């Protein structure tokens, strides 16, 4: 049943080009009653495999800023480890609504990126010339630590948080932000997933079923993307984390 459900979820995620870490947590906890810590462990570990292929594809297209990705990703490792240690101390009844809030914040950030990009355009332009030297590394460190922490603590990919941070504080384009974010998430997901595994919170059977379902489903779903009008795609991208957050919040 988990494989069948994640197959459908993977198809939806493939259609809209979303990562879906938060939705995976919602499905496993609300739909199948898994403990929230186990669901986060599975979600983070699955991200390792899904973003690896995406990062490579974006790199071949020249959409990955390697220096920026390496700097933020390295700091993100420490943030993810701190996040997982924090998550171990949070009771499940508090961790679920906290994860829900992160999904709702993701929805808000996606709305700004997709529908209100003009609101941040001027700020992005101003930061193109200031993100150099020590400022570059300071901003990279802060963004990596914060987004890595969010990913490790709540199991979300923090994709929207990373993308908008890269655009705001380094003045890069949306396409470069998307590709570079894939590179950044990879070390964060690996370190976070291993931390949960070492602490005995991983369910190998659920992980294999979930990974297989998401991988196959997203591969099939990606072939339907061009059939969906752009306006509908943008609405779907926003509605999915919104629904996931609301389900977790009311569960």
Image (spheres, helix red, strand yellow):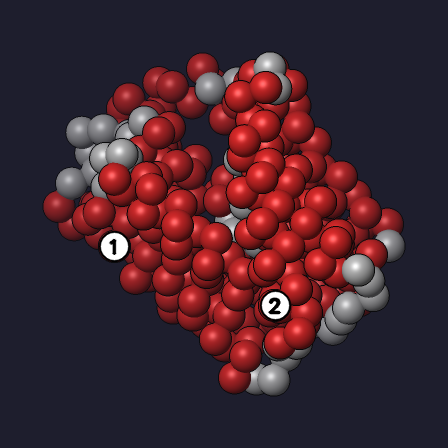
Q: Residue at x 39, y 36 (%)?
A: 178
**Image point (86%, 50%), residue name:** 250
Q: Residues within 10 Å of mark 1 (few under 14, many from 20)?
A: some
For marks 2 and 1, give the CA distance: 29 Å
38 versus 110 height, above or below: below
Task: Left or right? Give the position of 9 relative to 225.
Answer: right
Is any part of residue 194 visible from this angle?
yes
Q: Nearer the viewer, residue 195 or 19?
A: 19
**Residue at 42% across / 22% down in the picture?**
120
Q: Is residue 241 left or right of residue 93?
A: left
Q: Residues within 10 Å of mark 2 (few under 14, many from 20)?
A: some
Report the number of numbered marks: 2
**Quarter of the image that includes the C terminus:** bottom right
123, above or below 220, in the image: above
Disc number placed over residue 117 in the picture, else none: none
* Helix, strand or loop at mark 2: helix
Discs 2/1, front: 2
Residue farthest toward the right in the current orientation of the protein:
251
Report the residue that reaches farthest toward the left.
Answer: 133
Which residue matches tag 2? 208
Residue at 43% from the left image edge and 51% from the top image edge? 51
Q: Nearer the viewer, residue 216 or 153?
A: 216
Residue occupied by mark 1: 70
Give how far across and how far down residue 189 sits, in percent.
46, 62
Residue 125, position in %: x, y?
A: 28, 22
């Amino acid at each position: 049943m988990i494989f069948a459900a994640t197959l459908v979820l993977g198809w939806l995620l493939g259609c809209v080009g979303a990562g879906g870490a938060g939705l995976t947590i919602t499905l496993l906890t609300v739909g199948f009653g898994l403990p929230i810590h186990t669901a986060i462990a599975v979600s983070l570990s699955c991200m390792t495999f899904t973003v690896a292929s995406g990062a490579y594809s974006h790199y071949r297209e020249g959409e990955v800023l390697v220096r920026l990705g390496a700097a933020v990703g390295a700091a993100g490792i420490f943030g993810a480890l701190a996040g997982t240690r924090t998550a171990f101390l949070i009771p499940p009844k508090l961790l679920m609504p906290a994860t829900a809030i992160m999904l709702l914040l993701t929805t808000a950030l996606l709305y700004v990126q997709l529908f209100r990009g003009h609101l941040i355009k001027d700020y992005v332009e101003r930061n193109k010339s200031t993100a150099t030297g020590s400022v570059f590394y300071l901003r990279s460190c802060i963004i990596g630590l914060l987004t890595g922490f969010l990913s490790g603590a709540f199991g979300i990919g923090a994709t929207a948080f990373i993308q908008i941070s890269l655009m705001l504080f380094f003045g890069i384009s949306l396409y470069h932000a998307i590709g570079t974010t894939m590179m950044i998430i990879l070390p964060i997901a690996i370190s976070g997933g291993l931390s949960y595994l070492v602490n005995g919170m991983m369910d190998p059977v659920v992980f294999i079923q979930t990974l297989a379902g998401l991988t196959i489903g997203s591969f099939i779903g990606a072939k339907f993307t061009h059939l969906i009008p752009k306006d509908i795609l943008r609405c779907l991208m926003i509605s999915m984390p919104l629904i996931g957050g609301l389900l977790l919040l009311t569960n």
